Image: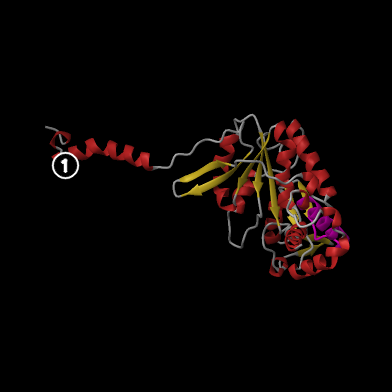
Amino acid sequence: MTNLDRSSPDEMDWKSVLPRFLVRGLNLLPTRDPVIWEKYYSAVWKRDKFGGWLESADRLPSIRLTQLLNVERQKIALVRNVDNFLQGLPSNNVLLWGGRGTGKSSMILSLLAEFSERGLRLLEVKKDGLEDLSEILRSVSHEPYKFIIYLDDLSFDSGDGSYKVLKSHLEGSTVEQDQNIMFCATSNRRHLLPEYGSDNQATRIIENELHESEVVEEKISLSDRFGLWLSFHPFRQEAFLDIVTYWINELSRHDFARVRSVSSFSKSDYEQEALAWARSRGNRSGRTAKQFAIDWLGRS
């Protein structure tokens, strides 16, 4: 009699019930429906203890390119780049950087309304999902659509090595990466990583040429992988007031201000209050202008 034949009854019982335990365990795992890209234009990569999955968004973002004022230079450059991408022409990965509330995220989201009918789709990845980038890209590589991998409010702390995962997937343009993928990131930091005065201590001038330290070179190298940089800055006073006026008119048209008609509003009614609002926030931005318009109309 072999050793296998001498198995105890308990061992034999485990062998018979183990497959049933496995089946029950698999049935307890959450089921994830695949994103139907013909129906949904955007999705978010989410994670839990069981892994990651794509969750579709139910509707298009409400923001439109025409609602983004005083950023024409940035709009023209981004739209041209995305148009090239959709045509299969050379195009760049994009970094939109600058002050908070200046329209960086809104500009990317507004691309869907502009280009979704031409096959553009948006896939948002949070920073904690960067480790899954290979899996994410594989999940859409066979799709007949063009995907913007949207990295919103991206920045990395000291000692955070997840930026190296992103760096390994980024090339200077879409020519070197998957042909249906473009990375678009927004950040308050131009180089995405914190920069300290001590980083420059090893910088040297050799034969009248500046040689950056290895620390500086490493930090710059990530943002350099984005071929197109678009900068956003706080608005001048008159530009800020123009945006306030736009949002007061726009919100009024949607029956937000029902006390009196929009025709009775004049800039002198709210100009000083709008500027005081911006000073209290320390920021003249499109977001600040819209927030003031909402507050002012509610009080009016």
User: On the rendered image, what quadrant is the N terminus found in?
Assistant: top left
At x 66% / y 51%, what residue is drawn? Answer: 152
Toward the viewer: 108 or 237? 237
* Most common secondary structure along the magenta stretch: helix
In what element is the residue under mark 1?
helix
Residue 245: say if magenta: yes
Residue 117 visible (yes or no): yes
Q: Where does the image place residue 66, in percent across and percent down from the top left?
A: 80, 45
Whether residue 8 is visible, yes or no, is no
Q: Position of residue 57 (x, y in %)?
A: 60, 42
Q: Which residues are magenta?
A: 232-251
Q: Toward the viewer: 122 or 89?
A: 122
List x then y, in percent, for residue 128. 56, 52
Q: Name the image quarter holding residue 242.
A: bottom right
Residue tagged 1: 10
Q: Residue at x 78, y 35 (%)?
A: 84
